Image: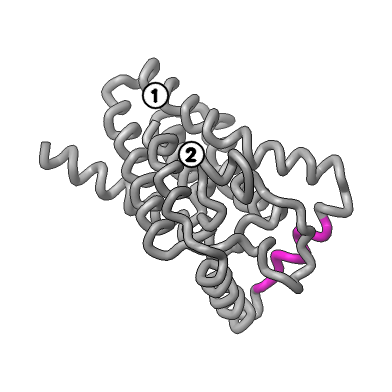
Amino acid sequence: MLALALSPVVAALAPDSERPLARMRRLIDRERRLGLFFEPRVHAWCDARPPLMRTLRVTYVAAHLPVALGVLAWTRHAHPRAFPLARDTFAATQTLAAIGYVMAPTAPPRMVAGLGYDDRPGPGDQGLGRVVQSPYAAMPSAHTAFAVVAAGTVWALTRSRPVRAAALAYPPAVVAEIIATGDHIWLDALGGLVVAGLGFAVARAAHRVA
């Protein structure tokens, strides 16, 4: 998948921490001016419940790519005519996100001192994780972008009400997760929503031209 191919490239181009941290501080300042900087409280509430936080950390790392691949596999099997657009939407979305990470790398809020986040390293902060992904890929949130694309694909192709309800619930659940783990703020999630929309627009335009 394109996400796997691009991640090491973005990681290799990751800068030192000064500029990415400054970008996140500016985003936090914007949320504060709006009176909507609530993310540390969400993190603290979840962190006070260790089983919940452990689950969120595991799903943050392990759940989202399988969901995206599962949606693509289901689309190819059950709706083969829709598969090329779904595949290209995922690819365009990841490409746009990767461009953003290279042009404007942004640290996750948990790296900003004094906000009350714990200091446990994330999966991309050090060691092998630093080789395969950048630690400064907070804006836009690719987790949110992929969740929106996956949910939109399922919503468009199924008529089952329970499945559609699950699709609708999936992106908000992902946003709650990425905020609770300290990896994103809600502006990152908004950026992910925008990137998902642009990815779909790019893929559909390419298919129309073709």
- What residue does disc 1 label? 75
Report the quarter where the N terminus lies: top left
Q: Which residue is drawn at 55% across and 74% down?
A: 22
Reading the image, the residue beneath label 2 is 151
**Compared with residue 171, is residue 59 higher up or lower down, i.e. above or below?**
above
Residue at the spot 61% in from the left edge and 63% down from the top edge: 185
- Residue extending furthest toward the top: 77
Q: Quadrant of residue 155?
A: top left
Q: Are marks 2 and 1 in contact (CB under 8 Å)?
A: no
Residue 128, position in %: x, y? 59, 39
One can see residue 32 in this view: yes
- Identify the amino acid type marked 1: Thr
Dot 2 surroundings within 10 Å: few (below 14), some, or many (20 or more)?
many
Under circle 2, the secondary element is helix
Judged left or right of residue 94, residue 51 is right
Q: Give the range drawn in magenta.
A: 37-45
Residue 64 located within the stretch drawn in magenta: no
Above/below status of 207 relative to 17: above
Identify which residue, 95 or 75, lies in the foreground: 95
Label 2 to label 1: alpha-carbon separation: 12 Å
Q: In this view, does 195 lie above or below 61?
A: below
Image quadrant for the C terminus?
Answer: top left
Q: What residue type is labelled 2?
A: Ala
